[in-house]
Image (cartoon, rainbow, N blue to C red):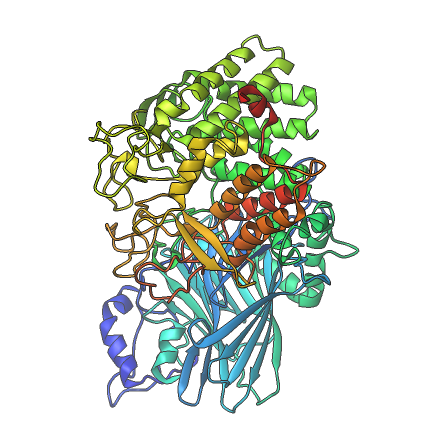
Amino acid sequence: MTGLTITTKKCQLAALITTALISTSIALSGCTPDASSALSQTWAPGAPGADPTWAFAGKTGIGTAYEPYVDGKYQAQATNPVSKVWFSVAQGILTETMYGLIHNAQLKELQFVMTGKGFIDTEKDHTTSQIEYLHQDEQGRPQSLAYKITNKDIEGKYQIEKHIFTNPDNDSLMMKVIFTAFEAGITPHLYVNPHIDNSGANDSATIENGALIAQTLAVDSTVMTVKTSTEFVSASAGFVGVSDGLTDLMDNAKLDWRYTNTGKQAGNVALTAQYPELTINTPLEFDLVIGFGADKAASLASANASLAQGSDAVLSAYLGDDNHLGWKDYLASLTPLDAMSRSTTDNGKLLYASALVLKAQEDKTHAGALIASLSNPWGDSVSAKVGSTGYKAVWPRDFYQCAMAFLAMGDSQTPKVAFEYLKKVQVTKDTKGYSGTPGWFLQKTHVDGEIEWVGVQLDQTAMPIMLGWKLWQAGVFTDAEISHWYHSMLKPAADFLVNGGKVKLDWNDTHISSPSTQQERWEEQLGFSPSTTAAVISGLVAASDIGALAKDEQAQQYLEFAKKLEAKLETQMVTRKGLLGQKPGIDASTDNSRSEIDKPAPYYVRISPQGDPNTATKLLDNNGKPGLDQRLILDAGFLELVRYGVRDAKDPIIAHSLALVDSELEDNLRLKYLFNAKDGSTVPGYRRYGNDGYGEDTQTGLSYAENGNTAEQRGRVWPFFTGERGHYELALALSGTLVDGKLDAQRKQALINTYVQGMETFANEGLMLPEQVWDGVGNSTRYGYRLGQGTNSATPLAWTHAEYVKLVRSMTDEALWDHYPKVSAAFSK
């Protein structure tokens, strides 16, 4: 055992953790003036360490190996192993990295710590970062999810270049690292903070034979092994904030605690390793690999195999070469992309990135399981003591958006497999713990179907029917196949949309009566929602059409019920006694003396709890915000009525509702904000609804619910609403004068410049589209967000990328991609 010199500060630390040392039978020596200066121990003290959290959720990159389906599944074969590793990048460093199931995180972060004359720098906090794609075509469009990250010291003392990707031949992540020092005395260190099996509170760490190893104390723990092609000078394991290497380095810029393991107590651990001191202007280049496995041997085998291959060979396989189908092969199969690129303002860069991002967010054990985002919202302020999927889970609504985007890109395999997966998350008589009416689709599940949230959202039950109809119309399903799915999955869903019924699952004990939904698309309010009802009507019309093919005598009732819902839209969801858009000082809800011409025009409310939108009924308190009168809250979800075909784009109530969405209300109720595009024009962005509290606190700048919910929280602008508005404006343009059935070229380009470019404006430097962007209201938080910059909520959001893809396809075709002609035909007047 190597002797370690103990400084005064380290003796103070030893005094603080005496109890921990006694409990693990560790002997400390050298903490008195006349004692030996050697620390004779191998176990790190200080369990359990600092409370663990997740990483910053605003990812600038995500990645995984492309894997082809085998008979509609991911099946490992000798010539085609299936790599089940996903990674994310944020703030210039490697963040949450998953192995096994897509939500099963194993790592919070991996970064480098640089020491030199008078400084100790962490890569995340003391460098400026640039990210670019390693593979691009001649137009600069990404060809794989492999990244080059260049981090430069803010004072110009050193540079760190990293190439990051995974190995399609095994379960490992590869990183080529190049250090360059521009002054003498600089030493790099590797710092690894594992969060094995989706928690950061139960880990142990070991240094063995030049490898850094982490696992939990559970018998069935995943094991993670980190190795590099350049040997470590020294290494140490410890508990974060107490005995880890970063705490050690902060003492005297030396890694002189040499703990070989963290002992028998689990906690939040870190592994730190020192590299040789750098020579000025002479790059140090090496390969770093993280291997994963169900045991130590498998983890080490993956790491060793990747090191033996070398990063160049692994990168070649990742892209696609003579022996591997890779990302370039997947992109080559998406034949519409090249033509679609001409309907963008960035030559298709974001379009190609979106194709890669959407495909990467699919589980590889449960093929077709499309998740919402490879992130944990506001992760760096969210506890990692207990496992959480965050957004790495299945919502049928987000799922529908992604499946439709795949179809738009020319990928018919993925949405077919995804549709078939949906049976796993449909409630049946066999659903564990359930009693009541079957047919609806679960609110949120793990990719393996494990139930997480149990609210009933009727749009999530309608959308699988809509998707099935689209796949049938596209020829992905034959008549026989869609008839099979109709009887086994879609008819029960349609029956639930018509009849509703008793629901009892976990906390949820209720009765559903369509179209009143227990939760609308924001999962927060009950009642009559325009966006939910648009999906329910469309789903029922689609079910009627498929049912006729399947010779179901009851199919006609779906169309009849859809027509009943359509006939009640205005009475149940449009207020004619609105509190918005009226003359100042006049309350239209109490002033019955005014003439019809002076009264405010009718408009769609976000949701009406009882289906009576003319009353002062308050919405539920939510996200720290007190509920307000239903007539005060706008939500542009009524545009889905136009997109699907329930209402014409020129409908006067739609038009007036949209005028209110665009009006400059006070900030709490306001929806629309303007942002600067790259061509100097302004482009629009929109919040979900007025009084939204799902975002950062305007006074303190704290993350959402960081210290509990507050009334000052504010939901920000969501970029996919720019896409939804673009779809509406395209529908409006198409309802006007056309030349030979085509849009005027100038008007079409104006739509592209405003809405396609608008969404492109919100992409970050890694071409990731966020859930929310900064709207400029209130405290810009600890990150000093710029207007239009993605926040720490969730990036990339699959729904946002899907909406962008669909918008580009709609502009290319000059037709709404999500439109349902059967719906338009049913309600044409």
Instruction: Give how far across and how far down residue 786 sits, in percent.
Output: 42, 65
Seen in the image, is 592 located left or right of residue 51? left
- Apparent side of residue 126 relative to residue 678 in the rendered image (left or right): left
Circle count: 0
- Which residue is the extreme one toward the right? 322
* Residue 531 position within the rendered picture, expressed as x and y whole percent measured from the top left: 44, 33
How far across and down, in percent of the image, does residue 372 sit?
A: 49, 45
Residue lying at 39% horizontally and 33% vertically, measured from the top left: 520
Viewer-side residue, 307 vs 613: 613
Left/right placement of residue 321 relative to residue 179 reads right
Is any atom of residue 672 visible in this view? yes
The reply to whether residue 367 is visible in this rendering is: no
Q: Residue at x 37, y 67 (%)?
A: 784
The residue most toward the top is 553
Q: Quadrant of the N terminus?
A: bottom left
Closest to the observer: 217 or 598? Answer: 598
On the image, the x and y values in percent for residue 567 come to: 43, 19
Above or below 464: residue 122: below
In this view of the protein, which residue sits in the foreground, 675 or 59? 675
Task: In the rendered view, tell whether residue 273 sits above or below residue 392.
Answer: below
Residue 457's quadrant in the figure? top left
User: As rendered, which of 482 and 447 lies closer to the eye?
Assistant: 482
